[in-house]
Image (cartoon, grey):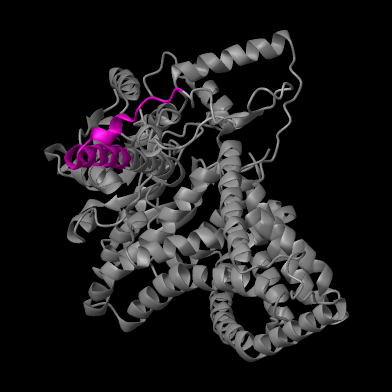
Amino acid sequence: MAPSLDFSVFWAKDTRKGTPVVVKMENPNYSVVEIDGPDAAFRPVDKDRGKNAKQFTWVLLLKAHRAVGCVAWLAAVLWALLGAVKKRLIFRQGVAMESEKSSKGKLLFKFLRGFLVLSMVALVFEVVAHLNGWHYFQNPNLHIPQTSEIEGWFHLVYVGWLEFRADYIAPLILSLSNICVALFIIQSLDRLVLCIGCFWIKYKKIKPRIEGDPFKSDDVEGGGYQYPMVLVQIPMCNEREVYEQSISAVCQIDWPKDRLLIQVLDDSDDESILSLIKAEVAKWSQRGVNIVYRHRLIRTGYKAGNLKSAMSCDYVKGYEFVAIFDADFQPNPDFLKLTVPHFKDNPELGLVQTRWGFVNKDENLLTRLQNINLCFHFEVEQQVNGVFLNFFGFNGTAGVWRIKALEESGGWLERTTVEDMDIAVRAHLNGWKFIFLNDVKVLCEVPESYEAYRKQQHRWHSGPMQLFRLCLPAILTSKISCLKKANLILLFFLLRKLILPFYSFTLFCIILPLTMFVPEAELPIWVICYIPVLMSFLNILPAPRSFPFIVPYLLFENTMSVTKFNAMVSGLFQLGSSYEWVVTKKAGRASEPDLLAAAERESKAIGHTQLHRGVSDSGLSELSKLKELQEAEPLPPKKKVNKIYKKELALAFLLLTASVRSLLSAQGIHFYFLLFQGASFLLVGLDLIGEQMS
């Protein structure tokens, strides 16, 4: 409670109280009396007249103490208020919002904060104007500019802007655009050479082949020595949606049981998921599968640490090859028979990589666009590099390694988030060769949500730059040929991992929109139209069914360059986000034909000792229930809805607007496109990516 400040008792002792009243009497025999107050005539004697100087000093000190206490109380209240404002507005402590209204609440909060700032600025302006006497009606000397004067000012400002733009801004943009265009041409030539190499492989029908028949079905028991010891590893972490189908598919690989060991490497920290995975492993172990469960209490090194820990076990020393499958991968039963024979009579071969197939590629627009990118990656990049260079980046899964190659290359290291590329580069520096099998596919999933896809792309683009910093000295001092060193440094790392996101972001997300304001720095039509369209056609050739999505693909790739450029910078300069590892969220989907075929094989496998590929018991029961419901009451077909992303679409629309404006600038109509550009910037300004709209 604030201290009272009643000074009237002391400071107002001699003040005259009351209202003066004049009373006039009709009878002149009475006199006129003037009364100052109700007790003026009977005022007591002042008690303070007898106080000495010492008492007067003590009274003054008491009043001063009360005044200081009041000031301290006001300061404490003000300090507490400022602390609460700081916590809520700056650190946002104690501000809780409902989950379903979080985006709207945050938007309203930002609007209120901006309105508060504008109000404070207006208040300061009003105070300054009042102190300087800028009053329209009270200051007759204030000059009000006329319309002609305002038009003259606008003309001078516009002419000055044109001169400044032409002399200072346009040369800088032109210089930067020339550099980006040169990098763009180099990268396009590299992409064109890869496509020509792919066409040559298709024309000549070049592919790795197995000479003879290393496995004879009529002499499996007698020729058991032909089957090498193979270790299969399934690293996973909290994979509730996909662990069951992955373990089921791997356990049904067609390979002698005594020559095969399956390791389920679980880094999960959820007790419910741990029990589910243990139960699944126990179920297949009871069926005679040589499978073990391994769990780490401390998840150090993420996937690399998990694989390194598993390879240090004593019981894996007698194995010659190791196959790795992520938790959402479902290999066919003949996977090992199609891959392991390539190692026979080829002691320099260290890795056999297979292609990925996607069960959810038609789920939404995002999965379709990913399918275009990944099909080009496997069909063109991996296949061409495997045929002509015997080197490519290991994809981290769906591949078979020679354990000797892993050990001689230093094994799995925990220094980057791209441990697969790290071991591939070190194995290449040690002279090991790689083979890519384009005709062997392993089913898996692509991320269906944009958040999962963005985090995956961040890891895929920040890790290579971090690895480049670490591997550059080893590349320069290695004993491989100068041609292979140049390929690793110039093409594998710099051109495809650094230059590609740099020029894509700078040229199409910065320079191209700026040309709408600075027409002196316009890009040539062949840069913004002809070459991008040609490259998009080449990229989409491995997935011809995706041809209707070529325009969204071109725009989406340019918008994704923001995320890729950010990841590249964080990896190159080893920022904190380059060490982030987030497990890509899975949906646990399986293609319908594959599910039906698995159910049929499972039903035929009853009573037989040989295992066939199939889904788990729970999956079969769900499938039978679904069939019963369909037979009882046919359900209407469920319409798929393509999910698009509002802010990505806004940025893509901005780029499309800038491109069309550049194409039509000769007709002098670019002013109308400035309106579209402004509307697009309003949508993209605060946060480029994140929200989705179905």
Residue 544 in view, yes or no: no
* Residue 292 falls in image quadrant: top left
Q: Quadrant of the image for the C terminus?
A: top right
Q: Is residue 480 magenta?
A: no
How many numbered discs sit on the rendered protein? Answer: 0
From the viewer's side, name the closer residue of 443 and 2. Answer: 2
Quadrant assignment, res 634: top right
Q: Residue furthest front?
A: 29
Relative image position of residue 574 (x, y in whole percent):
32, 63
On the rendered structure, is 479 left or right of 400? left
- The location of residue 668, given as percent across then percent down, is 86, 79
| Observer-nearest of 114 and 199 | 114
Q: Give, as a single range, the part of the protein colored magenta.
A: 42-69
Residue 319 % position (x, y): 20, 44
**Which one is nearer the viewer's eye here, 22 or 617?**
22
304 versus 124 height, above or below: above
The main secondary structure of the magenta stretch is helix
Asked whether residue 47 is drawn in magenta, I would say yes
Instruction: Assign the N terminus to one quadrant of the image.
Output: top left
Left or right? Give the position of 522 relative to 397: right
Q: Which residue is painted at 74% across and 17% down in the image?
A: 635
Residue 142 in which image quadrant: bottom right
Left or right placement of residue 449 versus residue 211 in this view:
right
Which percent across, then down, holds residue 384?
49, 67
Rendered residue at 47%/16% (across/down): 618
Residue that lies at the very extreme toward the left in this rendered image: 314
